Amino acid sequence: MSDHDELKMTPSSGNVFEDLGYRNADEHLLKAKFAMIINKIIKEKNLTQVNAAKLLDIDQPKISRLSRGQLSGFSIDKLIVFLILLNQDIEVTIKPHHASVNSDDFNQHFSLNYVACAK
């Protein structure tokens, strides 16, 4: 790149999957957020992939795929089951949105928080 080339930046939508043109971008984002939490809990519990696989009732190669963010074989439902098997409480709150009711921006209607317990 020369000194005369100009970098062009495009603002993010807030969802990298949407920015990259994925179909079902919101689902991809939700699965990625769940997977990040699952992987964090596995690390916090110092579980090996073999032990995590036994706990989650799947084989070790699937844990490996999960740890690398390869989520195509995992449904949102299955990821929620993994969180429950990792002794996590799941809370879903549905309430009227405070901004425009017609907004179709997924991030305006959804938040995911992970609260780690002190050891």
Image: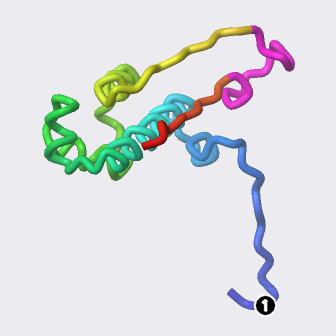
Residue beneath the point at 77% across and 82% down: 5
* Coloring scheme used: rainbow
Tell me: 101 left or right of 24: right
Lateral position of residue 8 relative to residue 55, left or right: right
Query: Crowding near pointer 1: few (<14 within 10 Å), some, many (20+)?
Result: few
**Residue 115: x, y in percent?**
54, 35
Q: Is 105 a magenta residue? A: yes
Task: Identify the main secondary structure in magenta.
Answer: loop
Give the residue at x 57% y 30%: 26
Give percent across and percent down for residue 46. Answer: 28, 50
**Residue 63, image x, y percentages:** 24, 43
Amino acid type of disc 1? Asp
The secondary structure type at the circle numbered 1 is loop
Q: State the residue in front, 78 or 101.
A: 78
Residue 32 x, y percent position in the rendering: 47, 40
Q: Reply above or below: 41 against 11.
A: above
Q: Which of these two is toward me, 73 or 79?
A: 79
Between 87 and 2, the residue placed more toward the observer is 87
Q: Identify residue for label 1.
A: 3
Q: What residue is drawn where x is 65% and y is 25%?
A: 110
Q: Is residue 95 above or below residue 81?
A: above
Badge count:
1
Q: Residue at x 38, y 38 (%)?
A: 38
Whether the magenta-drawn stretch holds residue 8 is answered as no
In this picture, is 68 found above or below 84? below
Picture quadrant of residue 75:
top left
* Quadrant into which the C terminus falls: top left
Q: Which residues are magenta?
A: 96-109
Query: Vertically, is 25 above or below 14?
Result: above
